[in-house]
Image: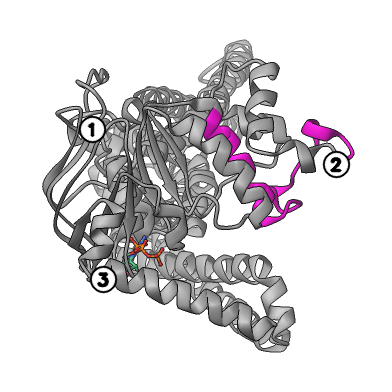
Amino acid sequence: MFGREFKRKYALTDKGVQNVKKGTFWTVIVNLVVMSGISILYLLMNNFVNLIKGNQFKVNTTTILVLLTLFVILSFITHLQQYKTTYGLVYGEVKVTRIALAEKLRKLPLGYFNKKDIADLTETIMGDVNRMEHVWSHVLGYLYGSYISTAIIAIFLFIYDWRLAIACLWGVPVAFGLLFGSRKWTSNASEMLKQSAIRVSDEIQETLENIREIRATNQEDTYLKGLYKKIDAHESVMIRGELISGIFVNAASVIMRLGVATTILVGANLIVHGQIDFMILFMFLLVITRIYAPFDQSLALIAEMFVSQVSANRMMEIYDTPIASGKETFEPKGYDIEFHHVSFSYDNHDVLKDVSFIAKEGEVTALVGPSGSGKSTCAKLAARLWDTNKGSIKVGGIDINTIDPEVLLSDYSMVFQDVVLFDDSIKENIRLGKRDATDLEVYKAAKAANCDEFAHKLPDGYDTLIGENGTKLSGGERQRISIARALLKDAPIILLDEATASLDVENETKVQEALSTLLANKTVLVIAHRMRTVQSADKIIVLENGRVKEEGAPESLYKQNGLYHHMVDLQSESSKWHIDTLL
Ligand SMILES: Nc1ncnc2c1ncn2[C@@H]1O[C@H](COP(=O)(O)OP(=O)(O)OP(=O)(O)O)[C@@H](O)[C@H]1O
């Protein structure tokens, strides 16, 4: 009952399954103890009937008082245990699950995030885990405990009088059958609700992120109208979902309660024919109230369980996605990067086709080519941010697909176009390059990347908080922090994707100096649109439509009169034109 399938179905950890087992056990005990209270009521009623008939009490009052006291004590202890095991332990499960999901996401290949949007993943870690928390604490133990205790009580009832037992219990399987039959509708409604909630939060996120552009283009009304439309749609889906589960839960509850009527009918019939006496019917009616009580609550819980299945499936999908794994040691012979017939596509969009080249250690290799030709993709593949579809990439003779990405990346310094900064101080953002770096090392790298110039103008210098993704800084300042980070890391492989694109000429010259110290004797792969930044490279690879079109040293390549030649000429033409028109 509580095996692997159960664990997967409710996205539980091993400890979580153990806790549900404990919760179930104590729910069974609670239900049986409560049921034993009914025997005391039965004894009291029996005494009362004897009193009316003018007979002696069957059980004396002291015994009944002792039983009552025992019942109260047992009830208190068992309810307390049930509370502790069901509600208390589950909070640990929530924390462990959130950490496990975040840890898994950290190890997933970038391709996974291409298919999922961030609002969706946030909804899983926060919303879905919250929903499951309620199922783990309030539903599973209670439901499974009620199944088991009812089965035990049903066996006793059947032994006592099978006719009354059937009259009393027939409604239970029918009500549950109806709910299980409605599962498809409730699950669909829940999935639709989740999707519409994600659409609303996506829209809100997009509006907030692009607020400047929306204002600049006077699109506030259009955006707000779109948002209101999505909120309205979400409300309708929510009402429809509540209605569907409400209809089925109430119908099931009514069916189950019909059991009271049939028990009275069958019991009265049996009394009339002298087959049972009134006290037996009375006992069955007492038992019914206790059997129905947990099931009545269970009907609503089952509906919640179906709905929660959507959340559990979404969590399991993250758990089940294979991570980019590999060996934990990386001992290459040198740091040459070799692309061997590499092909790659994002989903079904072919981007690189049979690309082969070598970026040698101690040299600067530049990737150039028209926009969209696959330059950045090559850099991302070289760092195993994505895995190749065909061919291989070797560093120092070792296929990088066989190395754990985290281990591999410790040998890379990267400065990409889209700089990522955290809402922390400038100093801590730079220290990300080398966790154990001293303040002095951080300042040295910062100075080399020309961060001094802007950091000293800020109120708290290097301790100034820079806002989410560095919103309080300019593009060039953000890029200099990213370069300082790379300088601090000082790894043997350097990937620079438009590293100095956001800098003005003065800053670019200074940062280039710092970069040239960093680049000495390393394997450097540079992507640049501006041809003058790659003219000092040792080798240039020209990409066109995902294929290597030309390859060689800048001067000899220029002489070939091919695409590179054309690009260099075009850029010097356009810069002349730009200056002329400005003048
Ligand atoms: N994450 C992604 N998901 C889907 N397609 C992508 C993704 N990243 C890039 N692409 C597509 O892959 C192709 C190559 O992109 P890439 O960024 O490698 O080109 P690039 O040569 O670096 O371009 P640019 O010079 O404009 O930066 C483009 O058509 C782009 O639309």
- The amino acid beneath tag 1 is Asp
Earlier along the polypeptide chain: callout 1 or callout 2?
1
Q: Judge depth for marks 1 and 3 and give the one in front.
A: 3
The residue carrying mark 2 has its beta carbon less than 8 Å from ligand 1:
no
- The amino acid beneath tag 3 is Leu
- The amino acid beneath tag 2 is Leu
Q: CA distance from mark 1 to mark 2?
A: 41 Å
Q: CA distance from mark 1 to mark 3?
A: 26 Å
- Horizontal side of residue 399 vs 239, given as left or right: left
Secondary structure beneath dot 3 equals: helix
The residue to which callout 1 is attached is 336
The residue to which callout 3 is attached is 563
The residue to which callout 2 is attached is 458
The residue carrying mark 1 has its beta carbon less than 8 Å from ligand 1:
no
Question: Residue 461 magenta-drawn?
Answer: yes
Q: Is residue 161 above or below residue 22?
A: below
Which residue occupies 49% across, 36% down?
A: 516
Residues drawn in magenta: 459-487
Q: Toward which corner of the image does residue 336 lie, by quadrant? A: top left
Please state the quadrant of the image where ligand 1 appears.
Answer: bottom left
- Horizontal side of residue 224 vs 275, given as left or right: right
